[in-house]
Structure formats: C-alpha cells, structure tokens
Image (cartoon, helix red, strand yellow):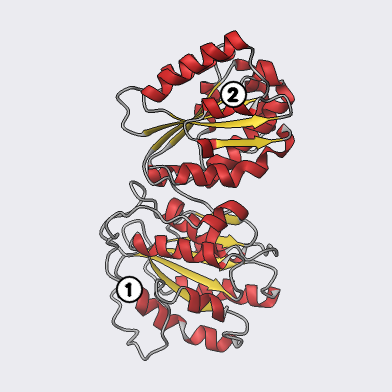
Amino acid sequence: MAAFLVLVAAILVQLVFSSDDITGCGNKPADIEFVLDSSGSILFKDFRKQLQFTENLVDLFDIGSNKTRVGMVSFSTDVIPEFRLGENDNKEDIKKKIAGVKYQGGRTNTGDALHYVRTRTFPVGGGRRPNVPHITIVLTDGMSQNSSYTEQEAAAVHGQGITVFVIGIGNQIDNFDALQSIKDRLAVRTCKVPPATPAPPTPPTVNEDAVLYGNAHCGPKIPVDLKIVFDTSAIGLDNSKFIMRFIADVSDRLDLQQSQSEVGTVTNDCATKSLADVSFGSGHDREKLEQSLVGTSPSFSWMMRKLRLSFDQQEQRKKVAVVFLGETLDGAEFRKVLRETGRAKFMGIQILVVGVGTRVNSRQASFLATQANQVFFALSYDIIDELEGPLLLQICTLN
C-alpha cells in the first residue's frame, strides 16, 4: 500500500489528516464515486471496515439528484459496479446497498478500477454533471498488481479533473476507531474540492510493456474507424468464433469512447450464429457488430472491395483495417486482391494483416499490409489471442 501511495503521490490528491472545521462544509453538491478494494490481500474483517466507514461517510452528505450523488465500484481481479452514480437518492437505500457488497478475493487490479472511473463514471464527452466536483474515494490496503499501468491510469484520471482521495485500510489504519475519526475531515475535504475542470486534451500516453505483456487498456492517439475483415466461409464457423472472441477482447481494451473510435466487421453472414458464444464487455456495441455481419463474399478480392466501400469518404477518423488471412491466394485472385488493396491504401486506409496457419504465404501477407511491421502471424486460430497486445499497440500508436 505504501508503495502505491508513493507511486501516485504526484498525481493523486491524498488525504492529509488535519484539524479541518467540520462545520464549514455547507452541503455543497458533488459527484462522489467510492472505489473499494475487495482483493485477496485485504482481510475480510478489514473489508467490512470499509463498508461501515463508507456507510457512515454517506450519512454526512446531503444526498439528492441536485445535491450530492454517490456511486460505488468494488475491485479485485475484476471491477464490479455496485451501483451507479446517482442511481438512488434515498440515503437509507444507498446504505443497504453498501452493506450488501460482496467480498471477492483475487488480484489487486487498481489500474482497472481507475480506468473504470474515468471512462464509465466520469466519461469525457457525456455523462458528467457540469459545475460540480468530481471525486473518487479509494479505500485499499494492497499494492497495485501492475504499478506501471496504475500510474498511467492515475495520470489520466488527474488529467480529467477528477480529485482522488486514497485511504489505507489494514496495516495503514489498523484501528477501526481511527478510521472513523477521519470521516468528518474527509467529508469536509470533499466539499472543499472545486468544480471539475479537465486539463486541455493531450495525446494519451501508452505504456508499451503494460499493453504488450499485461492487460492494460490503451486509446488511439487519434479517432479511429477500425474494421476487422475475415471470411467465415473459408475458415469455418469454429475458427470464426475465435476471431469474434478476439474482436471482443481487443475492443474491450481499446478506449473507444474516450478516443471517439468505433469497431466494425466486414465478412459474410455465417459468423452471426457464433456471436451467441462470445462474451462481450463494455468496450463496443454488440448490436452494431451483429448488423455489420451481412452479405456474402464469393471471393477474398470481393471482401477487400467491400472493405473499401464500407468506409465513409467524408469520415475524418483514421481508417484502419485488420485483415485475417488463412491461406495462400492463387495468382489471379491475388492480383485482384492487390488491385483492391492498392485502391484502399490510396483512400488512406491503413491495412494490418494477421496470417493464421501454415498455409499462409508470408510474402503475400507482407504485400497486403501498409507497412512491413504491420504483419502478424499465429500458428492457429485458437492462439490468436497471443497477438492481442502487439496489435493493440500498433492501433494505439497510429498517427
């Protein structure tokens, strides 16, 4: 815990225990998101302390749709939304929901929790209540599982004008009475926070190691219109399921809303049935992906033409395509594909190629890609998830 506090000390506003006057708050409205550590490093008794502390702190606020609104997430291996910001204006109902939060156990993925706060609780471009403080209160006892990713997310939270208070539980504050004694001071500190004023937008930083070897999210530097191209009639329904799961995972790790980007597919309708077996998260719109799985494709060159025509010429976003290739194309077909690919590149479409299996001609794959470093290979469709990090890094660093 101490290492985590030191790590983000320069960018997170930490609680300083001073003699604030608890009568000076004045019930100023604010939006407050509680973030509770539910990982295996925190004892169950300490987890219960967090819940009791949060209930007592809520008691001090004037709750209402035009007053102070509160929400809560718990985090461990996964981030679990317990109740949304402003979902309930009844203080007693809120306290009951807090008391009913379940202990998870698992890893301490603090970076994922901060990512959720800035992209889901206080998203840029919509959902943020203007002219009020945006506050996050993090209660945790353990060091973040991925410190570099946590640092990256903490910087992004700060850049959005969100004020964060970090409170140590367990070894940091091991006495329940001590925890309770700071609640009044914390309440005063929250009501003294000025309205959120996000910093001017800057290109998102990308922690390459966290993206390549971890599960870090990243956002494209510029808005991207991303299309995934694969021929289900050629690769079969089972392999199509692996690709759809890959699309779901990549989309969930891309900051689509933050970067005003979108993901779609170009294929035939055979893949639609496989969507029922794919778990979709929050990073993309399942209905849009389903609607994009239409039409039939008599040849690979036809699909490349369909890709080219699927992009809006007037669209200002960067046009990017990820093309899955599973076999060697015969000479006549390859020439047609090259012609369509050339037209696509002339339109400014950036083409990344994923070759899968032993039947792929690496020379053909290299010709199709826009740049030599935008070709990726996997031995089979069931291990294409190994390419998730490298592909994400390419997309997030496009200019």
The local crowd at label 2, few if under 14, some if 14 to 19, many if 20 or more residues have their Cα within 10 Å, is some
Q: Is 325 located above or below residue 35 in the figure? A: above
* Image quarter of residue 311: top left
Q: Is 356 located above or below residue 215 in the figure? A: above
What x and y, as percent, mark residue 316? 31, 32
* Front residue of this view, candidates 10 and 234: 234
Write down the residue under mark 2. Answer: 364
Please report contact status of discs 1 and 2: CB closer than 8 Å, yes or no.
Answer: no
| Residue at the image point whose x is 66% and y is 41% from the top | 385
| Residue at the image point whose x is 37% and y is 65% from the top | 158
What amino acid is labelled 1 in the image?
Answer: Cys
Nearest to N terminus: mark 1 or mark 2 = 1
What x and y, as percent, mark residue 285? 50, 34
Write down the residue under mark 1. Answer: 191
Instruction: Tell me the quarter of the image containing the C terminus.
Output: top left
What is the residue that sits farthest to the bottom in this orientation?
A: 19
What element does badge 2 sit on?
helix
Q: Is 45 located above or below residue 134 in the figure? A: below
- Mark yes or no: residue 2 visible: yes
| Residue at the image point whose x is 58% and y is 79% from the top | 169
* Image quarter of residue 296: top right
What element does badge 1 sit on?
helix
What amino acid is labelled 2 in the image?
Answer: Gln
